[in-house]
Amino acid sequence: MNIAAKNISVAAEAAAILEKLGVDKALYTQGDMPSYSPVTGEKIGNLKTVSAAEAAERIEKADAAYRAWRLVPAPKRGELVRLLGEELRAAKDDLGRLVSIEAGKIRSEGLGEVQEMIDICDFAVGLSRQLYGLTIATERPGHRMMETWHPLGVVGIISAFNFPVAVWSWNAALALICGDSIVWKPSEKTPLTALASQAILDRALARFGDAPEGLSQLLIGDRAIGEVLVDHPKVPLVSATGSTRMGRDVGPRLAKRFARAILELGGNNAGIVCPSADLDMALRAIAFGAMGTAGQRCTTLRRLFVHKSVYDQLVPRLKKAYQSVSVGDPLQSSALVGPLIDKAAFDGMQKAIAEAKSHGGSVTGGERVDVGHADGFYVKPALVEMSKQAGPVFEETFAPILYVMPYDDFDAVLEDHNAVAAGLSSSIFTRDMQESERFLAADGSDCGIANVNIGTSGAEIGGAFGGEKETGGGRESGSDAWRAYMRRATNTVNYSKALPLAQGVSFDIE
Ligand code: UN1
């Protein structure tokens, strides 16, 4: 069946995909939480939500599942994630299309998001045989000291609309191999892709056979449901992706009950183009970083500092790219820029542009584009030339606005680069090794991601993902991010016949 046929409505196409992926129709047709596609503005679901009491029940179920799952050997837990990767490969086309329908991503980015899920599954399968602890030299004879990593418990996952499924998978794949159970509260703007992902995991669970029931729970609902998850005493870790405002609420609530937090919040990512930069390369990287995903990645390039000596070579070309970039329906065209998520995003963008103008900004683009869907919010990405950082440049507006500023002095531009509240991603374009190394040094970029000659967005899953300052400090995905999902025990074993005390202390009772 070609469910991508052009003449069926977006809602019908979403329903066909959900049916194909095995999602119970009642879950998205018989509820009272509406869901819309940003592509057309059309309603695509009426979601059944959970009550606070049901949410608490599901968390209890997940806790019971964790108690059994933690006893399953880690490589066997990896087998479940291997099956999830297989199921995702089989569903890639459909789930990628559903991401496009629900989040408005262009086709290749919808597919790329599912690829990111597959990649983290592969990573986690390998990791399931590598949950290594250290053996540590002890100061006492006949003793051995080591670290053991144990499963932690229920992992709460709160995800945002812009990566509706990949961010869940970063957490889910790691948590599952680490011996944890998972409870997911997806964005209210993207519940259908969450239902689909849960159905895909359910298929992997069925093939796996004897996983404890309730290992993965989904909480469709509003903010109050998220709060149940954040406040529940049986959830020792919450990994939350979203705005800094959300993090300011979630962080202290978790701290209050000494639960762990992995926070991945706002970004205000910058790039620096130096005199020696390969300008063709920089142009392409900037275009993808700033206009890709309609400026709705947390890694989106939002500030660009261009050295005065190359400003007049690069910026006119960049403006041309902004004027000619194709904006359109991501389901029916090969446009590079799809819609904003909703009207609020559009209004926020217009407000920031107006403020930038009042600070002397000169704007290319930014206007609404008619693609034939009156209720879809399509815009030309905006490039705003500013003489220096001011007003809205210091804030993250979740829309395609790139502030471009000239610079003269390398030390000063490093300072300007770091002079914002967020610290997620950053990049420098240079062929001068001293500049690139300075950018990566202790007094260089203060972000969790610092790149040379590639853009700020589109990180691979193999590295730890996250940022500093108001980005929240959490790390997800690759490298050793798995450690946050486990409990570390330091074990000292005495195999001697004596009881020497550390630090030379004597305590002889006879
Ligand atoms: C996000 O926007 O929340 O680095 C995640 C990137 C993607 C992930 C973005 N791999 O742009």
Image: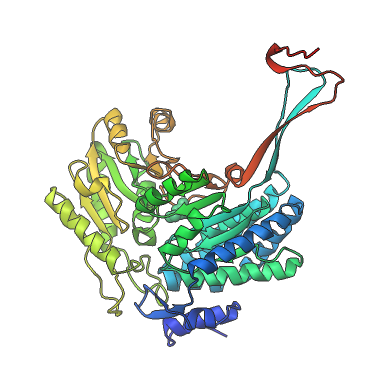
Q: Residue furthest bottom?
A: 7
In the foreground, 185 or 321: 185
Left or right, residue 66 beside residue 385: right
Answer above or below: position of 494 versus 147.
above
Q: Residue at x 54, y 56 (%)?
A: 156
Where does the image place residue 7, in percent across and percent down from the top left? 43, 88
Q: Is residue 67 left or right of residue 292?
A: right
Q: Quadrant of the N terminus?
A: bottom right
Residue 339 appears in the figure: yes
Q: Quadrant of residue 138?
A: top right
Is 199 drawn above or below residue 319 in the view shown? below
Q: Position of residue 88 (x, y in %)?
A: 61, 66
Question: What is the x, y in percent for residue 362?
Answer: 16, 52
Q: Nearer the viewer, residue 338 or 16?
A: 16
User: Please, is residue 126 above or below residue 50 in the view?
Assistant: above
Q: Residue at x 55, y 72 (%)?
A: 196
Viewer-side residue, 497 vs 35: 497
**Residue 461 image point, x, y percent:** 55, 50
Residue 86 falls in image quadrant: bottom right
